[in-house]
Amino acid sequence: MASHDLPGGTYRVGDLELHRVGYGAMQLAGPGVFGPPADRDAAVAVLREAVELGIDHVDTSDFYGPHVTNEIIREALAPYPEHLHLVTKVGARRDAQGGWPHARTPDELRSAVHDNLRNLGLERLDVVNLRMGAVDGPEPGSIAPQVEALAELQQQGLIRHLGLSTVDAEQLAEAQAIAPIVCVQNMYNIAQRSDDALVDLTAAQGIAYVPYFPLGGFSPLQSEALHAVAARLEATPMSVALAWLLQRSPNILLIPGTSSVAHLRENVAGAGLALPADAVAELDAIGA
């Protein structure tokens, strides 16, 4: 599959023209996103295949592993192709038990940016997402001190663009009063639709919306409905879920993750599935 065959076309993220189908590298670390993978060569192969397929943005973080995923990305892809852009995330760390405690003080954020730069082998990060909420959704409160710390690093030339993760519309507006925001990365899928209004808001503002866990949070009833549509279209549930997201709004960019070359190819091809109107209506009802 050549790059021009990637489904969904492109979307402008700041000054970066990105294909709407990217790759999420979280699963390249060991179980629980902790420690090294069982097969490092396979992880390297997946990354190189992603670039061969024409994928031009990889989503990562130095707290995956920790450090493991970024080190594998550097091993597999550096020196990086000019068209490839790395999107990373700060705001958490890993403890010895594999937990995800917050790391949100300005000093911790500065340290995390430098960790990402060092382990990826870069002088500037293309996009840094500030993770503020919990994995399953935003937490109320001001995010100004954190955004100000990252905006200062951006002014120093260490960060090209700023994004946000697990935030609500009020926090997005607060951040935008400090610095331009080019993307929002929150949990969203066919069943988890609490961000419908934020998807539309970011689309109206020309901000990319990047959903994670596209198949997470399904009840048996919802899963049955998804599987029924997939069976009728002779497609996999993942293909249908990804295709629904691409058709939901033009500002949605996908970062499906996998540690398998075969699954990577399936995800990229599946996202290009054309969903007929009756299938879209059936899928929309899942999250109603």
Image (cartoon, helix red, strand yellow):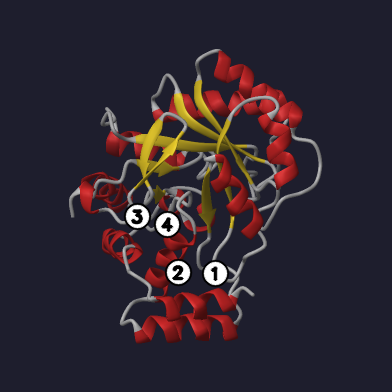
CB atoms of marks 2 and 1 within 8 Å: yes
Q: Which quadrant of the figure has residue 193? A: bottom right
- Cα distance between the residues tagged 2 and 1: 7 Å
Label 4, on which residue? 256
- In the structure shown, which secondary structural element does the residue marked by tag 2 occupy? helix
- In the structure shown, which secondary structural element does the residue marked by tag 4 occupy? loop
- Cα distance between the residues tagged 3 and 2: 14 Å
The N terminus lies in quadrant: bottom left
Label 2, on which residue? 241
Which x, y percent locates residue 134?
A: 70, 51
Q: Amino acid at mark 3?
A: Gly
Q: Amino acid at mark 4?
A: Pro
Task: Give 88 or 198, whichever is nearer the viewer.
Answer: 198
Label 1, on which residue? 190
- Cα distance between the residues tagged 4 and 1: 15 Å
Q: Write the residue at 69% across / 23% down.
A: 148
